[in-house]
Amino acid sequence: MPLVLEAMSTDSHSPYTSLRGEVAERLSSFFSDSSDGRSASIDAGAAVASSQGPHRPRNEDRCAVVRFRFGSMRPDIRLGIICDGMGGMAMGGEAASLAMAAFVSAFATVEPNSPIEQRLAKSCQFANEEVFSAFRGEAGTTLTAIAFGVDVCCFAHVGDSRLYGLDQQRQLDLLTSDDTVSGAVNAHLGQDDEDDLDNRLLQFVGIGDELE
């Protein structure tokens, strides 16, 4: 479900974690409203698009661009996130929607002065906990998110939804390593092969305590 969303958080000293569940619940139904087929959305400086492809009965991708405004004391942060529900498991789309909602709500409610990398790590952990709690390992999703502000850019990655950058020659540069059997072997050998056949996931959001 491609969409563009603008969110706001403040520097209030209220208990942020108490808001997390409520925000996640509201966002979950929003992200669940996914139409099948092809769709796209464009925002200033960002675009998202998705296609369910020729072999799947439904689209289990969820993607969004989120802008967080934290008031005049701190610069805005923009977050791009994609979750690809695992088609080989039951309710992959529902797991992707829940992971998106949990990740975004956690990112918005982590302590105000937390650095971006800490926000990403805690958001990933919360998404994993929520999906595992709901499906007990019977459903899961990949998750790749990139967050950037005025002078910082970081990403979080679980699964095999790849993140690319552009190098100085404007050539594509793969920034992530797949959490698959092939990806682990290639990383150990110092190789960077995107076309290996063994794509069984070693990690996914919703796996439980094993998530790294």
Image (cartoon, rainbow, N blue to C red):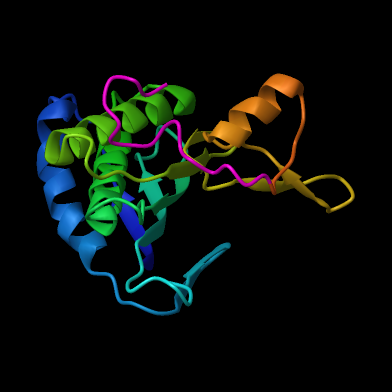
Q: Quadrant of the C terminus?
A: top left
Task: Reply above or below: 85 against 123.
Answer: below
Task: Reply above or below: 211 against 19.
Answer: above
Q: Residue 185: tell me if it is visible.
A: yes
Q: How many marks?
A: 0
Residue 211 within the magenta-colored segment of the rendering? yes
Q: In this rendering, would 193 be left or right of 98?
A: right
In the rendering, at what x and y percent does residue 185 appear? 65, 26
Q: Nearer the viewer, residue 95 or 20?
A: 95
Q: Which residues are drawn in magenta?
A: 196-212
Residue 144 within the magenta-colored segment of the rendering? no
| Residue at the (33%, 74%) spot, across then down | 57
- Residue furthest right in the image: 169
Task: Reply above or below: 143 against 67.
Answer: above
Q: In this rendering, would 77 be left or right of 139?
A: right
In the rendering, at what x and y percent does residue 11 appear? 27, 31
